[in-house]
Image (cartoon, rainbow, N blue to C red):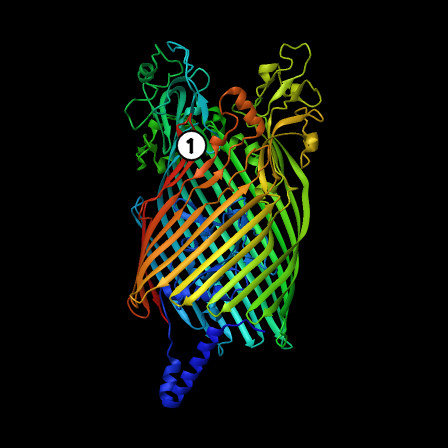
Amino acid sequence: MPKYRLLSALIAVASAGQLQAQETAQPEEALDSAAMEEIVVQGVRQAELNARERERDKDAFSSIIATDDVGNFADQNVAESLQRLPGITLQKSEGEGKFVTVRGLGPGFVTVSMNGNELASAGEDSRAFALDALPADMLGSIEVIKALTPDMDLNSIGGTVNVNTVSAFDRKGDSVKIKAQGNYQSYKEEFNPKVAINGTHLFADDTIGVGYSASYEDRSSVVYQVQHHSDSLPRYITPDVSTLPEEYVGDPMLIPFRYEARQEDAERTRTSGSLDLGWRPTENAEYYAKASYTKYDDLDMAMREYYRFGQAGSGDIVYIDNDSGLFGLVDTDLQQQFFIQDGTSETTAFSIGGENRFANDWTLDYDFAHSIGEWTKPDGRRVQFRTRDLPMLGVAGPGYIQGQVVSPDVLEALSGSSSLPQSGGYGGLNGYQEGERRQTNLLYDNIFIEDSFREDTIDQVSLNLQKDFADSDFINYVKTGFTVKQRDRYRNKDRWSVIPGDYTNGCDGDAECLQLAGARLGDFATFSPAHPDIQQDFITYDEAERLLDITTPIAKYTDPLRSGQDSVKDDYTLTEDTAAAYFMGEFQLSENSTLIAGVRWEKTDFTSTGNLSIRNDRFEVANEAAVLDIAVPMEGADSAYDDFFPSLHYRYEPREDILVRAALWTSFTRPSFNEARAFADFSGRIEVCNDIEGSANYGECSDSPTDIGAQSLDDLSAESKNFYVSPDNVINLGNPTLTAMKSVNFDTSITWYASDDLYLQAAFFYKDISDFIVDVSGVASSFEDMPVQIPVDQVTEFYFPPGQVYNDVNLTTNGDEATVYGVELSYSQYFESGLFVQSNMTLIDSTANVGDTIRADEIQLPDQADTTVNFTLGWENDFVSLRLISNYRSKVLERIGSCSQADIDADAALGLPQNCATWADIYDDDTFSLDAKATYQFNDDIQFYFDAINLTEDKSFKYFEGNEYSRGNMMFESEDFGTSFQVGVNYRFM
């Protein structure tokens, strides 16, 4: 029995009666004219009505973004549209939405598919798909499915974002639309063009449909950033310089490890196209072929100025003021880097399939899909200039970090010191010049080259068979099917990072190369970046490219075989073969209620290869291209797991304007590629211990073997056993034995379709996630007990004692559990005056146990915002549409510091919260943005639009939680991307 749509049926009957009356009254010529006239409705209201209709017809609870009747989205890109849906938040990069979080679960928990098939993604080593590569112009609709049925891919605890390309059968007619747009960003101060076309055509009595799209966009932007070091944590300091007049007595200060001011100049080019071919030879058969292509070129020029507080060690702390947050150091570095990175991400997808209906009540559909994602970044490059041994002041607080090179006299006056050590880089002929933006004496002391490639390929076959029971009062249909998917992925990254003056043999006698290997910043043309916090001039782009071109042979000379640790530790290949089968049915419980019940079986076989890598450069000789780093392939790392995932989906329509849904369903999320790939590396230089009894250094350990008695590599070998690898080395480990996280989910909602002008919805959801995957730091383990076999038996250069326990192993493992629960509220109303309101609010809470070795207490789930509010106030008539759009998101926990019970106990003895690093929790602060959008319908075919984005000049701001020793929060990162404006025109030909 079909689902009841009483209101729709009444409208259809009424329309039929009205049409019959008109047929009686009108002459035949008028009827022909009326039949030929196309009635289309444009605007925000019509787009929302179309979305509501599709949401209501879905078996599963979904939020949908649809176009109006002529194919116009209310927003210009996918990310902007998604962030206006309930339960959705965005992760932005340089001012543009990139990844989506659904109901508090981050991008790794959300699958992105196109036309129902998962898209390959090579841009990251997570499973997250970057939405900034998808232009809205190639799409017909966007849907977020929040409660999945057994016939869907269940690898998505958060939900699934499915984008559908333009289809002629969906649009139900011929259309051609061209868009021309200009974008202006306030900091870049130049216009960027975009052109797009999409269309649909029906042929052969509407049995053949063609849909297509193509778009091209250039977008340049400038982003200003201030950042703490991305990996190193803040540290405690107390004044300890030897020249203090008296020993410091007082509380320590928690200060930033480093201060960075960055200006990112990005030039991004997006190219896309899609083709949708459909054939309906009969009412009972349909065949299709769909293809899409997206290309995203990203030229990024980054100027980074570093104030390296972390270089100041014991005996270098001069001054602290706990009230103001001001501190003074010596032996610090001022460093500049000019990065040039040109990356290209390409995704190609196609699918072929069809649907056949036979014997009146059987439906068979089938699909083959192929998707390949490729990321290439050849010749990423950087030049670096630096001055060492500088006196420096720093200050940090809730919303800022600052650093400044100062005269030794300043620090002496603040501290009362008579003189300062380790400050010889200031002043003189070759030192830092006070008051000068152009620091001519900064030494060219590093060249960095990186070639990076990723490829991700997915092949998928699926088949579904459905039996309808039109004459049954209880069973509507039963459905079964299967999906087989194969995924192959690889990554290859090669990196060179050297001091040019140490390897001048790489110049091969070239005079200019030899000269520039020891150059200083004053040898080049410079300019002043626009970033207000960058204090010194930088080498120009043209001069940086010239310097790189001439001295790159030095870098390539040092590792011609690309066998250094940095060139092998991130390389991997992996294969993921999955199979799924399901059975489900829909049951008519009453005239106005149905239940979908079913179960899906999923099986995963995972295999990965990678490398054990060890840095071993202590016996390398300057100016010789002999890399001694160690790389041993890790073969045969694999895992296999399977499970059954049942679900129930209930639907109840007590009235034609009320819809109630409830679902109890199960799903899973596979580990990210970076978590599950095979790899093991010793962080930094490997530390060894002297085991020669009677030696003056017996029992001592160091990462500099010559300091503890080693004379050559032979002394360290596994054969000699005179030295053994220290148990205090830090080992980073991948874990191919990880299994998928599993979740039991409950969703319920009630929707009131009061009229076309009034819509209200309330939804509640709950997720109980088991086998939650966590990063574990500082685990004690022997090689024999690690989750993957480490081939140290093939390393002859060092001796690894059998059964030795290593005290600091970092890996990813299946941990405890997490829970998420929340409420979504939506309200939309259109008034006779033309005013309208669109709004939604999501309230979420969560708890996660990440394991006692990481955190003794429960935490909030990372990437989850407690509160998200979207509110739009607008006015619209037949010609003009105006909207003021606001978005609020509360703070988000991004990263946690470790705090085990052992850390708490150690701090109790110390009297200082040093080991229990809850102060190192990183939050992305709350945000509020305001956009304005306007459209003017010049005639039936021409529409002009104007967008003003981020009128509030909202900044992304992240901070460490901090404590009383940092005076509260301490900035981790701020990103200022300014305001952008867009003006454009849509022209419809038919």
Task: Name the image quarter holding the N terminus.
Answer: bottom right
User: Where residue 72 sits in the image (x, y, percent)?
Assistant: 38, 63
User: Where residue 749 sits in the image (x, y, percent)?
Assistant: 50, 59
Q: Nearer the viewer, residue 777 or 554?
A: 777
Q: Is residue 649 above or below residue 498?
A: below
Q: Residue at x 50, y 20 (%)?
A: 911
Q: Is residue 905 above or below residue 215?
A: above
Can residue 46 be seen here?
Answer: yes
- For disc 1, the marked residue is 228
Q: Nearer the viewer, residue 504 or 750?
A: 750
Q: Quadrant of residue 624?
A: top right
User: Where residue 691 sits in the image (x, y, percent)?
Assistant: 67, 16
Q: Is residue 60 above or below residue 429?
A: below
Q: Residue at x 49, y 22 (%)?
A: 912
Q: Type of residue at label 1?
A: His
Relative placement, left or right, of 240 versus 724 is left
Can residue 571 be seen here?
Answer: no
Q: Secondary structure at mark 1?
A: loop
User: Where residue 625 sits in the image (x, y, percent)?
Assistant: 55, 28
Number of marks in picture:
1
Q: Decide: few, some or many residues near mark 1? Use Cα within 10 Å; few <14, some 14-19, many ≥20.
A: many
Task: Name the image quarter holding the C terminus.
Answer: bottom left
